Image (cartoon, helix red, strand yellow):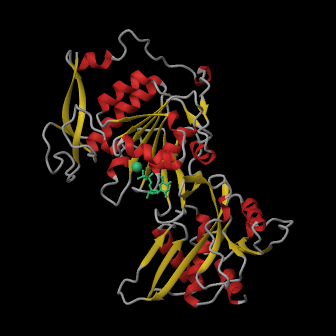
Amino acid sequence: MARSKVLYQCSECGAQVSKWAGQCSDCGAWNSLSEALSVVPAAGKAAARFAGYAGATRPKVQALGEVQPGQETRMPVGMEELDRVLGGGLVAGSVVLIGGDPGIGKSTLLLQALAAFPAEMKALYVTGEESPEQVSLRSQRLGVNADAVRILAETSVEAILEHARGEAPQIMVIDSIQTLYTEVLQSAPGSVGQVRESAAQLVRFAKQTGTALFLVGHVTKEGTLAGPRVLEHMVDTVLYFEGDSGGRYRIIRAIKNRFGAVNELGVFAMTGKGLKQVRNPSSIFLSRHEQPVAGSVIMVTMEGTRPLLLEVQALVDDSQLANPRRVSLGPEQNRLAMLLAVQHRHGGVLMSDQDVFVNVVGGVRVNETAADLPVLLAVLSSFRDATLPNELIVFGEVGLAGEIRPVPNGQERLREAAKLGFKHALIPAANAPKSGVPGLEIHAVSRYAEVLDWFSNT
Ligand code: TYD
Ligand code: MG
């Protein structure tokens, strides 16, 4: 008989100790020990090594070419934008983690998705946060077919799994993983140990039975990130909600996907009747100023497989601080510091006594280097209090040597901009199409100095 034993594991070095302490005795990390479970078979370690194989066929080494992959069955979710981020539908037996701030719309999305599934699919919604009455009220407000969804209000993993074995659903949603606890650990629900062990049991169930499993996880301010983040390596797909919960639009991004591409975006609008898909999101984040304003630039990013036009805004202002502030929401902070250094070294524009703020409208996170040139241009435009031409789009990577580098999918970006009625494009010379793009006047640059010349002459 295997018996399980509670112990404490260091999240930094993996050391295991039997008693909790504030500091790991192995690596010296503080506050890194959390409750964990080790299964020790009664017959000792040697038996443990082979226990898993008793009666089962042991895996053998084989040539990769001999392996016959089974056809993975994909179920369309019935919401195109969600299917898109999942990589073309839900895979049986896969585990999807959906993270995001509280109130951003995780429960709403999943309830809508469950109800949209084909009627012959059995769906089980496990709620640990809200009562069935609350979920029912919401489903009425959303106008979803409530008969399609089975609901269970339970927070004990053992009890949930017992019900799940009886129900045998094709899809199961756990809302949220932070509310669950397993009886084998003593720590409180939401602690790292509980979250990890509860998820491990659920993942095992999903793999054994082929149930597609959604785990909802709250990501809040720094410090409480521990919850969902520790699960990222255990699951097949990680989706995160972006965008501010005050705004109208919600973006779902695939951070990790064993069954599809990452960085694919799904775009939704939050309405009075739940989340509505935005099928053509390329221009929703543009504010379209009547008159051009200083510090605002429209860039074309390529998130996943779709071009997306975003407005990047910058504000450069005299600083009262010894270390002027560099704040960047959207593009990465270090990237901004690097770009400002390039601007000084290769353009002679010094901003060391200025605060610099950069923001991408709509709360979209931009990881692409194609945002370099638009960010620099927005900063320059604000610094000089000089506007850029109306109907201009910009993209391009800026190198440390002051060169403007090409980015992938230049043609597609230009075509999308032309389609939306933009008239000018400032882009890397290597991205300039030989035959041009109808309706678009292209200004090709290969050095940062050329960008400054172009700006001074517009
Ligand atoms: P919810 O799905 O409860 O968020 P989460 O599960 O991520 O915590 O989303 C709730 C927010 O969305 C809430 O502030 C109200 C708003 N909302 C609408 O605007 N319209 C709707 O139809 C619904 C159901 C919610
Ligand atoms: Mg919720």
Q: Is 269 rendered above or below residue 44?
A: below
Locate residue 172, reporting x and y percent.
45, 34
Relative to 83, say whether 451 is above or below. Answer: below
Give the percent coordinates (x, y) of residue 389: 71, 83
The image position of residue 131, as x and y in percent, is 35, 43
Q: Nearer the viewer, residue 116 or 416?
A: 116
Q: Quadrant of the N terminus?
A: top left
Q: Quadrant of the C terminus?
A: bottom right
Residue located at (47% from left, 88% from top) = 317
Q: Nearer the viewer, residue 345 or 236?
A: 236
Q: Is residue 164 above or below residue 99?
A: above
Q: Which image quadrant is residue 79 in?
A: top right
The image position of residue 427, as x and y in percent, is 71, 71
Q: Is residue 403 visible?
A: no
Left or right of 437 in this view: 175: left
User: What is the quadrant of residue 376 in the picture?
Assistant: bottom right
Measuring 62% from the left and 23% from the top, which residue is drawn there? 65
Which residue is painted at 39% across and 28% down in the image? 204
